[in-house]
Structures are given as structure tokens and as C-alpha cells.
Amino acid sequence: MANSLPAELPQIISLDALGTLIEVVDPVGGLVEALAKRGVRVTSEEAAQGLGAEMSYYRANSAFAGSPQALEELRDRSTEVLTDALPQSAAVIGFAAMRESLGEAVRFAPFPEVVAVLDALRAGGAQLVIVSNWDISLYEVLDELDLRQRVDAVVISAEEGLAKPDPELIRRAVSRVGGDPDSTVWHVGDDATSDLELARAAGVLPVLVDRYGQHGDLSDTIVLDSLAGLLPSDR
């Protein structure tokens, strides 16, 4: 397999969300701060332990949150997991305040180059589809970060009843923007397992974004250190 991108942009680019377009910003510090505002002091280590339990639970169950009601139930259960994993003294603020604290702690931001790259890719003629293993709260996140208007469609695993690396997700992404089996497609993601397997199973070009050099030598794969590497002018 070639290890450099074609000179021309494809008709469609499928993009993973977390780790590719957006990142979680200091959730431990955010939780310490959110709880302190409500009169509860926890250490960074205690906050990390609580969030670790909550995030593990959330990830394991987010595939079922494909409706607003299911999302609210998931957030409630995740709050209970967080409360149980924190020191008992933290529970004094009550369930509602703990859930608010959790919401304040888990904050997202786009990577620095993302907005400009998405705009440039669309200006260059590519249609963009976000394909993510996420629950339907991804719509909220994309709206808050001003990213949803910068893509042509969003395909969320919980809503589709599928998860990466099922290639049907790519087929649906292509269909959502009017593509067909002959369309040229790249899939761009940061997971060397699910994203690469997804692309190869769907028969599209896999591109790995390895921002932190954590994947080692992948000589048969196109690897970029940021999304800017997709742009012809940056190659």
C-alpha cells in the first residue's frame, strides 16, 4: 500500500471525531474545580479515580444512547458511578449537583488546526462526513465547537445501531452525501485498530492521524501528525 496521499483530494472524506477532530480538555482539573465551586474538595488523584470509573462505564454503555431518553439515563447512571468512586464526603452535594459537576468537567475543544483544515477541504471540493463511535450527544459537542456546520453529514454509531469497524458505517456516510460505490473516499482517524480496519473493510483509503507518535512504525499506512497533512499545500 502507498504511504503517501494522492495528489488530488477525494470526493468524500470520512473523519473520526475524538482524537482526530477534538480532544477532552483536562477533565480531572475540571472536576476538581466544579466540585470546589460547590464546597467539596477532592484531590486530583481522587478526581482521576472517579472519572476513570465514570468514563469506563460511559464508554461501555454509550452505544445504547441513541435517543434523548437513553442519553439522559446514561448520564444519570454515569453520575451514580462517579459518586460511588469519589470519597464519600463528595456525595453531600446531592445527585443533581454532582451531575452538573460532571457535565462541567468533561469539556471538549477542537485541535488547533481543525477549523481551518475543514474549511479548506470543503473549499477544495471534498465532502466531509464525521463517522464516530459516540452517543447522540456528539451533535451537542459539534454544535458547541462550531464544527457541525463545517461538515456535510454526521454518522453516529449509537444512532445507527452499528460501531466501527463495521464497514456499513462508511457506506452510510457515503450515501448521506450522495456518493456511490465508485466515489473516491478516504477515512481519517486516530485509532490504529478500529479506524484502519474500518477503512480497509470498506475498501477506502485509510489515513491515520498520530499526533503524539504513539503508534510506532506503520510502513504500510499513510500516517499524519495532524489534520493539516490532508491539505495538498501542506504535503
Image: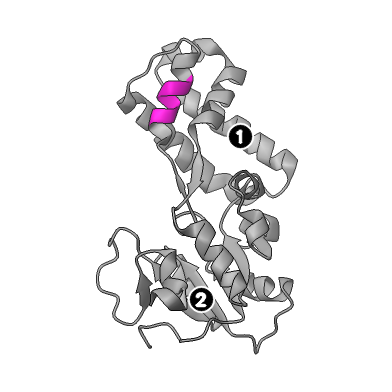
- What crowding class fits label 1: few (fewer than 14 Cα within 10 Å), some (14-19), or many (20 or more)? some
In contact (CB < 8 Å): disc 1 and disc 2 = no
Quarter of the rendering occupied by the N terminus? bottom left
Task: Give residue 36's quadrant in the image.
Answer: top left
Say if 21 sits above or below 24 in the image.
Answer: below
Q: Is-magenta flag for residue 30?
A: yes
As drawn, the label of residue 199 is 2
Asked whether residue 85 is in view, the answer is no
Report the magenta residues as a range: 29-34
Q: Closer to the camera, 28 or 163? A: 28
Residue at 52%, 47% (x, y): give it.
60
Which secondary structure is most common in the magenta stretch?
Answer: helix
Residue type at tag 2? Ala
Residue at 57%, 59% (x, y): give it.
132
Q: Closer to the camera, 169 or 141? A: 141
Q: Closer to the camera, 46 or 15? A: 15
Q: Position of residue 229 (x, y in %)?
A: 41, 71
Residue at 44%, 12% (x, y): give it.
40
Residue at 66%, 49% (x, y): give it.
139
Q: Secondary structure at mark 1?
A: helix
Say if 182 sits above or below 73 in the image.
Answer: below
Residue type at tag 1? Arg
Relative placement, left or right, of 147 versus 193 is: right
- The residue wearing badge 1 is 75
Q: Position of residue 206 (x, y in %)?
A: 46, 77
- In this picture the colour scheme is one colour
Q: Earlier in the sequence, mark 1 or mark 2?
A: 1
Relative placement, left or right, of 145 versus 72 is: left
Quarter of the rendering occupied by the C terminus? bottom left
Query: How far is the residue under mark 1 from the one under mark 2?
Result: 31 Å
Relative placement, left or right, of 191 versus 153 is: left
Q: Is-magenta flag for residue 149?
A: no
